[in-house]
Amino acid sequence: MAQVKAARPLELFSRAEWSALTQVSRWRGAWLVVHGWAVIALAIGGALWTWEVAGPLAGVPAVLLAIVIVGGRQLGLAILMHDAAHGLLSPNRRWNNRLGEWLTGAPVGSDLQAYRAYHLTHHRYTQQEEDPDLILSKPFPTSRASLRRKMWRDLTGRTFLKTRAAQVLGGWRALTKARAEGAGKGEVRSFAGNAVLRFLLVNALLLIVPWALGAGPWPFLIWLAALATTFQLFLRIRNIAEHACTATGSDDPFTHARTTHANWIERATVAPYWVNFHSEHHLFMAVPCYRLPSAHRALVAKGYAERMTIAPGYAHVLRMAAGAA
């Protein structure tokens, strides 16, 4: 099937407007990475401090809240890796890739290079049969019971275990095959750059460093609990909101994705770092995440909102996905 039609930015914006929207800041991407990790550290540190000072009665709710906050920032790291895949996290390609590989992708189990190839195919064939992400949106709308089962699997860690087991097994098979075929040291070393070993290495550091500083295993256990539960749930809801129940096979680039208005709770969980402006992202891949709100306001001001798929909130999207909206 032919590639989807792309928007023509200079038919929508002046050259000055488009230049401003596509300017990649030298510091904002790095600052967002720092922000994500700082929120994670504060959430975990606050929960452990509350437990130590006030005991389990206040400590248990604090830990549960930390798992929610950390899961939201883990999704935030994945979103920032997504920006790096588009070369938008830093104008310096080397720093862009380093941030995307080690500080955003690896901690949550993603590989920048593999994701970049996969994701650009998704943009090329959005909601077409060749779209590798179609599997995420095609099942919807579904029944409420089916959606509840999916979300329960996320919150009980089954999605995490299934995904990571498949990832580790696939990586081990690739390494075993490379050795059996007599791969050279360089080829074997290239395996060390894939998602499996980076994920294991970074997470090992997340366990060892706090423990060496006297915090024990508890910071890592909160991180891991979030990665296995709330991160999986928030990732699913984000995926549903972006493309589920949108036009399939449409020639109109304004219909390829959904923008969802998000309140502050949603921005802290399922919609970090402006990922809710997904229609704008599909229209204009060259716009960094922190400039998507400006792109949205400009499109609304120019009268394009009626052509776009815009939802009032994530609850509305979930009702639609469950066939109830």
Image: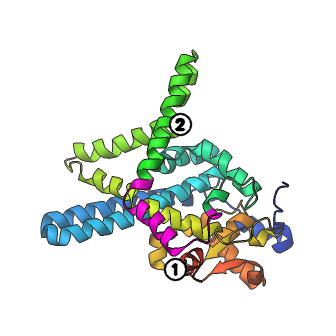
Q: Quadrant of residue 25?
A: bottom right
Query: Most prominent secondary structure in the magenta stretch?
Result: helix
Q: Is residue 306 above or below residue 20?
A: below
Write down the residue under mark 2.
Answer: 194
Q: What's the residue at 44%, 42% (across, down)?
A: 165
Q: Check contact, mark 1 vs mark 2: CB within 8 A.
A: no
Q: What's the residue at 56%, 75% (across, down)?
A: 322
Q: Is residue 275 visible?
A: no
Q: Is residue 285 above or below residue 206?
A: below
The residue type indicated by label 1 comes to Ala
Residue 59 percent across, percent down from the top left: 19, 68
Write down the residue under mark 1.
Answer: 315
Label 1 neighbour load within 10 Å: few <14, some 14-19, many 20+: some
Q: How is the image coloured?
A: rainbow
Q: Quadrant of residue 41?
A: bottom left
Residue 270 percent across, percent down from the top left: 49, 69
Q: Is residue 155 magenta?
A: yes
The tag earlier along the polypeptide, 1 or 2, is 2
